[in-house]
Amino acid sequence: MSVLVAALGGAVAILLGIAFRRAAGAAGELGALADALPGATPSRSPAIVCRTLRIYFIKPSKYDDAGRVQYFWKGVLPNNTLTVLAALNDTYNELRRDQGVYLETVIWDEQVDGPILSATIRAMQEKALEDGVEVIIGLAGVQTNQYPRGRDLALQFRRAGFPVLFGGFHVSGYPETRAFLEDCGITTVVGEAETIWCELLDDYLRGQLRPSYSVTDGIRAKTGSGEITVPVITGAQLPAISDPYLHRFASSSMTTLDTSRGCPFTCSYCSVKNVMGRTMRARDPEAVVRWIRDAGDRHGIRSLFIVDDDFFRSPTWEPILEGMAAYRRDGHDLSFMMQVDAEAAAFGDLRPGEPPSSQRRKCERFLELAAAAGCYSAFVGFETFNPQNLLAAAKVQNLEKEQRRRKDQASDRALAAVKEKYRRVVHNWHRHGVAVHCGYMIGFPFDGPECGRQSAEWLLEVGVDLASFFIVTPLPGTEDHDKALREGTILDWDFNNYDSQHMVSHHPRMTTAQVVQAYRDAYLTFYSARNTMRSLLTFHGVPGLSWAARSAMWRQRAYYFYSYRAGRHPMLGGIWQRRLPAARREVLTDEEARGHYLGGGIVSAEGVRLGLPAA
Ligand code: SF4
């Protein structure tokens, strides 16, 4: 049976491929799109096929500064939301297997599968009519900087008569955008989809798709300022691995996995706590370990990015790491990177005779197990050295405990304490062979024009292996955004620029140009030709690091050097940006987009004009 299911999936991919190629050819863009066909994920379960829904999960790209849709020869990080949603379709097929409904899944990541053009949309429409299937479009996991591109696609699909869903952090955290999209006939999905998806599809099948869905079935979790309902994910389906999708990336043996969700901390610039809550929820650890083994055995996965926002705070890190370590002891090749907070490795030397605290024992156990399980890189949010900035951003976990209550954050002593803490974090990870990749932000209120170069030098001094720099951005759904609104400091409302590479709000001490220059100084200093050459020529020869960590840092240092100089944030880009002249930005604001894309009204798939949405 599995052969049949695989054959069906393959056939879907081929048929869709033919349709896209034909449409692209008609538009004279066959060459550019030929390599950008999406991966169709075969469903695992058979169904009595009476009514087939072809669901496109689309991850929109963003526009670059020249207005082109960014897409790349190879991506660097697969998108976890797409594979999680594909898995939810599998679950639905199993649930409704005897009810005459069957879901086909197509995932399309614009960054690597290529921009969706009007010819592509026509091809989807023609192919659906030809196959006698219904189509649902799901714009998935849309971040704020992807919103303008996602909106433009959503409106074009809506104009073509498709039912369109729109989810992700941006709509989840920004009611104004939800109101606009819903007014245009687009259904918004707020929060995580696990307990929404089945109900939403059932509503669609009954012809009762609602304008908006949000989580109602779950547990209550605190956010930065209130409470939300979040789903329990213990038994949720794990991500569906799509081999064709992974082949669009620099390493096809690497994929992503989320084992827990939420974050207990309250950093004012971050929307994670407000969309996913501060109560940590985790998947069943045994299921996670089974999934990892299966990924290795059936898909050749050798490397994972555990995308949990703070894996150290996951209630199930211990059994998961034990399971991964056992898998490696069985002779399997497995390595991974993860995100953790600084506290996981901030402990210092014990004084003679001092017994280790239970917290310290927990940290040491975490580091030992992580190394045994194949961890080669820990991403740690250092964000700033300045203690006043840490307090202003409510990132108190990076301060020493006694410092959190002191009033002398402006003193040299307070700064030295933060530097010393970061040095210990790097040292402890290095002792276990794990490299440290830090996140660092430029443009906090107490930063000055020198902060970029100075911070990069300090990061090198404390021994950080890789650094990702970001400009502080008041993202919708964060306390920083609310504050910027109250104080009237937002300078730029084009969400396409909310990508941490542009300065979109007023800074109390620097001009916009100075903040951008400080950001450039930071990466030009950290990734100077000299530092990069030293890393490359010594194969990142940092004492203590494992071979896997050195190898990864060697490659990533080279990639970061290339990407920053190409003017792209390494975490948002890919390798070699491709150009497709037809894929350009045409409008700026929501209302321009409404007029431009819905000016001719909404037309159903059968060609029935449904009329304009209310202006
Ligand atoms: S920045 Fe990191 S530590 Fe802070 S709230 Fe967000 S996910 Fe948590």
Image (tube, grey):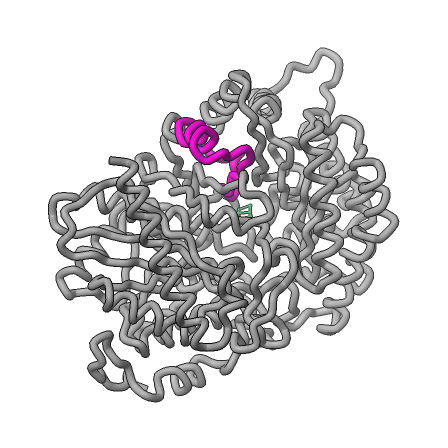
Quadrant of residue 3 in the image? top left
Count numbered badges in the picture.
0
Whether residue 220 is visible, yes or no, is no
Judged left or right of residue 344, residue 545 is: right
Q: Is 392 situated above or below 31?
A: above
At horizontal 60% and vertical 32% (from top left) the residue drawn is 344
Q: Is 362 situated above or below 394?
A: above
Residue 91 position, x and y percent, is 26, 43
Residue situated furthest top in the rendering? 353
The quadrant in which the C terminus is found is bottom left
Q: Which residues, given as a range, are shown in magenta?
A: 288-315
Viewer-nearest residue: 319 or 540:
540
At horizontal 53% and vertical 55% (from top left) the residue drawn is 270
Quadrant of residue 611 in the image? bottom left
Whether residue 24 is visible, yes or no, is yes
Judged left or right of residue 507, residue 38 is: left
Residue 610 position, x and y percent, is 22, 82
Residue 308 position, x and y percent, is 49, 41
Residue 23 position, x and y percent, is 40, 72
The quadrant in which the N terminus is found is top left
